[in-house]
Amino acid sequence: SASKAQQALQKGRGDQAVSHAEAAGLAEPRNPGYRAMLGAAYMEAGRFQSAATSFQDALTLGDTAPKTALSLALAQIAGGDNRSARSTLEQWQDSIDAAGLGLAFALAGDARRGVDVLGSQLRSGNNTAKVRQNLAYSYALMGDWRAARLMAAEDVPANLLDARLSEWA
């Protein structure tokens, strides 16, 4: 069931992934990896509250993967619980990759903190497209469209820049 759930997730088949991941979880209810996979399946299926519960269960059962913690925060954000998401991010901030952490803070309603995290990464030499684009999107979420445009222009061709900013808006 676990391998079938993983295959369904890779193909973007959320409902199939959920049924297979639930079966794996029933077979081994104390397996944190299966709980995390179930959370991912719920996310793919748009069941954000269930995803948050499954990711939290995985962490409680001993999963220490920063990806699981970030996934929990993203599920909380998607479910409208920004305060819990920010708490999760603060708890795991030393473990989660800064590019994801900064964007997650911005998505959780703290765009200023997201910009600070991402800007610090950029200044410290982590000058990657992912950091730059997450910073650009965080600027947009903060309402600083000029900075968003300037940062996005680092990686987005000029003829596609307006479309990207319109998508963000």
Image (cartoon, grey):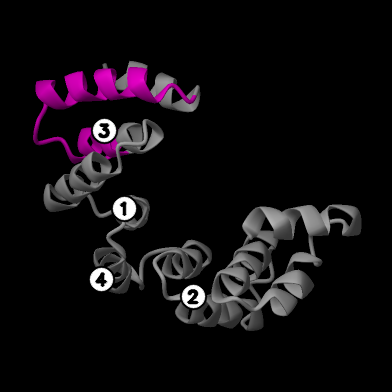
**What crowding class fits label 4: few (fewer than 14 Cα within 10 Å), some (14-19), or many (20 or more)?**
few
Q: In the displayed structure, would residue 134 be above or below residue 21?
A: below
Given the image, on which type of amino acid does mark 2 rest? Answer: Ala
Mark 4, residue position: 87
| SS for dot 4 | helix
Given the image, on which type of amino acid does mark 3 rest? Answer: Leu
Q: Find the distance from the CA under tag 4 to the CA under tag 2.
A: 15 Å
Viewport quadrant of the N terminus: top left
Q: Residue at x 29, y 53 (%)?
A: 72
Badge 1 or badge 3: first in the primary sequence: 3
| SS for dot 1 | loop
Q: Nearer the viewer, mark 4 or mark 2?
A: 2
Q: Find the distance from the CA under tag 2 to the CA under tag 3.
A: 29 Å
Mark 3, residue position: 38
Q: In the displayed structure, would residue 131 be above or below residue 167?
A: below
Q: Give the x, y percent position of residue 107.
A: 45, 64
Mark 1, residue position: 65
